[in-house]
Image (cartoon, grey):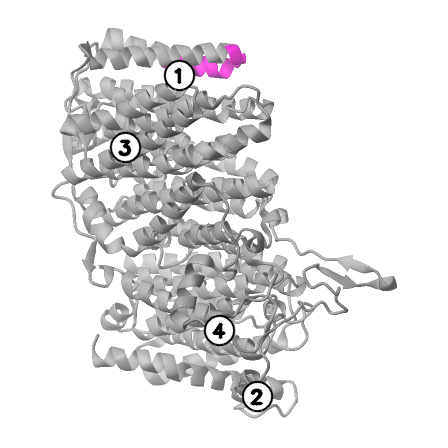
Amino acid sequence: MNTVDVIAVLAAVFLSPLLGGLVAGIDRKVTARLQGRYGPPIFQPFYDVFKLFGKEKMVVNYWQIFCAYMYLAANILTVVLLALQSDLLLIFFVLAVGGVFLVIGALAAESPYSQVGAQRELIQMLTYEPLIILVFVGIFLETGSFKISQIVATYHQPLLISLPLLFVVLGYAIVIKLRKSPFDISTSHHAHQELVKGVMTEYSGPYLGVIEISHWYETVFILGLCALFWHTNYIWMSVLVVLTYFGEVLVDNITARLTWRWMLPHAWTGGLLMSFANYFWIYAKLK
Amino acid sequence: MVEGLVGVSILLPCIAGLLCFLIKSPGTRSAIIVTTGAILTISALMLFNIGPCTYTPHTILGIDVNLLITVADFALLFIILGIAFKLGNPLVVILTLLQIVPLAYFELKMAPHVEVSPAFYIDRLALIMNLIISIVGSLICIFGIRYMEEHEHHLHLKKSRQPRFFFFLVLFLGAMNGLVFSNNLLWLYFFWEVTTFCSFMLIGHDRTEIAIRNATRALWMNMTGGVAFVAAIIAIYYKTNSVEYLSLQTLINHSPELTGFLLLPFALLCFAGFTKSAQVPFQSWLCGAMVAPTPVSALLHSSTMVKAGVYLVVRLAPGFQGTYLSTMVATFGAFTFLTASALAVNMSNGKKILAYSTIANLGLIIACAGINTPAAIIAAVLLIIFHAVSKGLLFLCVGTIEHAIGSRDIEDMRGLYNSMPAVSRITIIGILTMMLPPFGALMSKWMAIEAAANIPWVVVMVALGSGLTVLFWARWAGLFVSGPQLKQQEVKKESALKATLMTMFRGFYPNAKWKDPASIKVPLVLLAIGAIVLSMAVPWIYTILVEPVVSSYRPGLFVEPFKTGPFGLTSGVGAFYVLPVFIVSIIAYLLAVVASQKGGHRVISAPYMCGEHYPDPTQPKFRSHMNSWRDYLAGNVYLHEFIGEDKISYWINILSLIILIVMFGEVVR
């Protein structure tokens, strides 16, 4: 491990929550403006989490605490592996660990809200996981490697140019992964869910704070994935990431929640068709 | 030395089985089973230590072995014919005759006195299989001792039928060892039929109507494979006009110009493998087999019997590398992986979830064999190893739970952690080792996806199937811990390290004792430890076991796909840092345990109910209309409307038949 790697790991562990929290703050501000409100200060997510850590510790079942920390650990590891430019599929599988523990934590509490939330979260995972694998396979077909370090070293052209449809698929998957409307099915960051707070219903106080911080890591990871599509130039990379995230916020605000019965077949069909179209394009170019 | 060990691996289980059958004393029988297991394990380890070898036995007690096996083969087929008449099942009769007549014609008329040298070709793949069969199989047999006692106690049998049960169970290990060692296709066929026969007897063991029906189904489906096997033997001889190619090694390392001629026999043998591994459209026999007592499910249908099918396909794979058949095998396997995973999501019966997940994993192994690159073959072999351990463990867990709570439905396992913490914890370990990194099963899946990436439709099916597997495993693991916090944690003044260690081994309820007898505890604990330790040791397993498997496949053609380094495996296309991820996972696990164990002020609350709670938080009730107390229960989503078993099974069977027809159509042409 050289110095660069050490710095990357440290940045991933310590800077990502700051960045993630900031993104959450901007998200809330933009959302408020879109809804014609003034909105909270940009640092509001940090104030919220500090406040959560000062609250009384309260759980239904000790497993929740265990699962909250496993969720955090998996998400930190995901970002670290991304910063180390590791294997895309490996990163993806570690990401799945976090999702699984979030679900187990929600199932640990016997409340019907968190139980139903957990089931829905599982279906959301079921929907976006294959899509993300398909995107990674597309990246492999184009660049010949699953390893980010190798892609960055050997492929000198923005991925977006040859994988535009897969970027759309990724965008689709991100909306589901970040649980933004119209796919805020398992839980919602707006206070208007029919399931109370879905998977997070039974989390409160410091443990909710842990989940919140984990979510920031998750956001950073997602942004990192988007950044991969324009790895050749930092300015365009930033533009792409900002535009993508703004797009997600916009979609979040102009759509109403759908059911998983709509989401699963549509996301799979659309995702598959677009992936295949893009694969064919890659093959056609090779020929 | 080799002769002795091979003899022990194959003949000892047969003799021990006979002894189990003849000796009626349960104590002696248990002693025989445990001793046999121990000897088999030691012999497998010693044989592994010797390494690849060959051996051709000529006579046993003065009788020619070839003759002996031929006679035994026909005797077995006639026994099955007799059973078929007794069952009054014309299909089985026809399928048996379709084997007896061609085989008799072949042995008497076409090619009498086939001598294949070496008769036993024991390479690394065979040694790995031998280790799995001998160790996992023996542990399952030992588990069976106590299990069957309770099982018969539940059934109120007047006369114990355990001698018969253990006869077939132990005999099975011998047949499997013979199967993986055989190089002579005729011998392989004999052992193949023995496993079919044993599984028929074991599935129908309880003699209930449904048991007999499912056993019959297993019999005819496997007999279809047997017919294909005989056809393959005759086709090989017919096409090459030489008995030389009845040696598996010659068959695989044939000269390139023969590939076109040999595709049909390869396809037929793969088909035999598909039936034995219960691939779609033959999945129903494996699911039906779940009526048998749990040791049968665990032994025949997770670690051995079904592994015979994938073993054969993986063994043959280098022989049809780069052909059309190979692509079709990959497609077929991936299709099975996807559909069986979808069906598993649909199940609430724990054993059926395991059954479908087994079929799915076998499909993935077959897909890897079809992808047929060294990396893919490595993925297949690793998957065979890790799946055998984790799945064997899970079957035993479900069996133990079933005896305790009288149900195998996962909805009934809700909150089981409160009453059976130890078994629940081991089951959760089993589930996590099947689905999450850094455990071996997932690592094999990762390798499979990277290997499949060049065949888009295969990788799509694997990706979708992989998402489905996460769904049914995560849900099941979560159900175990669901429920109220039964009692307050006793906060003792212990060091954090001690508390952590205590929690690792005894969970959040240090007071709950594990009451099961040793013959149930030992296999569970050993398999659970095995599942974790094997995963940690992946880089070493890779160097010791798997890499030589592939390099012995096609000398000269082999390009080392992965490099083992101190941090795990790296390949040209990807990297999987096993050890760092493992270390980080363990640290995270320990920190999470410490965080949840830590003392201090903490409130255990009742779950949020959007209304008033029942005073006793352990009772799931809330105040509803008219001031009445109402129960509540949330169930799992099984996606019936999309993928109900009754709805899609038909289409799955049709589609898989089409794939098979396309596969054969092109090969025959």
Extreme-top residue of the structure: B109
Same chain for the residues under marks 1 and 3 in the image: yes
Mark pair 1, 2: CA separation: 81 Å
Chain letter for mark 4, please: B
Q: Nearer the viewer, mark 1 or mark 2?
A: 1
| Residue of label 3 | B40
Residue type at mark 2? Lys
Q: Nearer the viewer, mark 2 or mark 4?
A: 4
Residue type at mark 4? Lys
Mark pair 4, 3: CA separation: 46 Å
**Element on which disc 4 rests:** loop
| Residue of label 4 | B598
**Element on which disc 3 rests:** helix
Mark pair 1, 3: CA separation: 21 Å
Q: Nearer the viewer, mark 3 or mark 2?
A: 3
Q: Nearer the viewer, mark 4 or mark 3?
A: 4
Residue B325 in view in this figure: no
| Residue of label 2 | A29
In this view, A128 is above or below B90 = below
Same chain for the residues under marks 1 and 2 in the image: no
Mark pair 3, 2: CA separation: 68 Å
Q: Which residues are magenta?
A: B86-99
Q: Give residue B246's quadrant in the image.
A: top left
Does the magenta segment cover residue B96?
yes
